[in-house]
Image (spheres, rainbow, N blue to C red):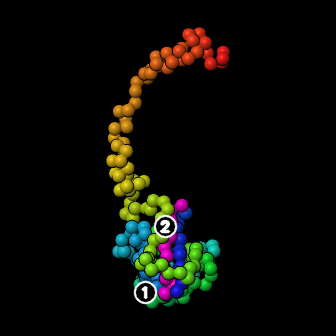
Amino acid sequence: MAILKFRVYLEEDDAVYRDIVIKHTQNFADLHFAILKAYEFDNKHQATFFRSNDNWQRGREISFDKYDKNYVAPPLMMAETLIGSEIRDTNQKFVYLYDFDKNWSFLVELINVSKEENPKIVYPSVSRTEGIGPQQYGTKSLLGNKFADIEEKYDLAEAAEGFGKEGDGEDEEEKESEETFGEEGTEEDF
């Protein structure tokens, strides 16, 4: 059984991505839910995949449901379409759209095919996470909820109190320099 590894990039920032491993016999609905889970999105909105080429042009649509929009050709249904049946190339690409109002766009690229299934993994599974994913509903801050953990760990609220006044410590530095080099000596004299 083939295990496929897809890299799922956030379209706006290719430094933010998730690697997802999935069996070739699983369907696109499984991949859809794995992407949502990897990016911590809910599953309340419309979603669709497009088969793509190296230039990320959208081809055949693989939709979660038949939506009220114009289709060039009737879409394949995610729940009925096996991932292996849509792999045409060793670096097959798909464009994944989620929440047509917000227009979340992800680039999905096949990066590895393996014949060895790991019995300890429940497929599909996230095998790698890079970058901080976006907030689905607005931006609380750059780090989202993780900022509170960082603030608590490093106690950033007290950082402002750690600064001294201008001129503090100059007397000590002068004394050290006099002891090392003599009263009139400088480092260049030695």
Mark 2 Cα within 10 Å, few/some/many (few <14, many 20+)?
few
Of 179 and 109, nearer the camera is: 179
Provide residue 6's location: percent of width, then percent of height: 53, 74
Q: Find numbered disc 2 in the image and state the secondary structure of the residue it sits on.
A: strand
Magenta range is 15-25
**Residue 17 part of the magenta-drawn span:** yes
Under mark 1, the amino acid is: Ala
Q: Nearer the viewer, mark 2 or mark 1?
A: 2
Of 79 and 111, nearer the camera is: 111
> Distance from label 2 to label 1 (Cα)?
25 Å
Of 50 and 159, nearer the camera is: 159
Provide residue 36's location: percent of width, then percent of height: 41, 72
Residue at image point 57% right, 79% down: 113
Residue 72 visible, this angle: no
Where is the C terminus found, in terms of image quarters?
top right
Provide residue 141's location: percent of width, then percent of height: 39, 53
Residue beneath label 1, please? 79
Q: Which mark identifies residue 40?
A: none
Q: Which mark identifies residue 128?
A: 2
Residue at image point 50% right, 65% down: 17
Of 137 and 101, nearer the camera is: 137
Name the outermost residue toward the top: 184
Lower sequence index among marks 2 and 1: 1
Under mark 2, the amino acid is: Arg
Residue at image point 41% right, 54% down: 143
Q: Are marks 2 and 1 in contact (CB under 8 Å)?
A: no
Residue at image point 38% right, 32% down: 162
Q: Find numbered disc 1 in the image and state the secondary structure of the residue it sits on.
A: helix
Indicate whether 96 appears above or below 160: below
Residue 6 visible, this angle: yes
Indicate whether 178 appears above or below 6: above
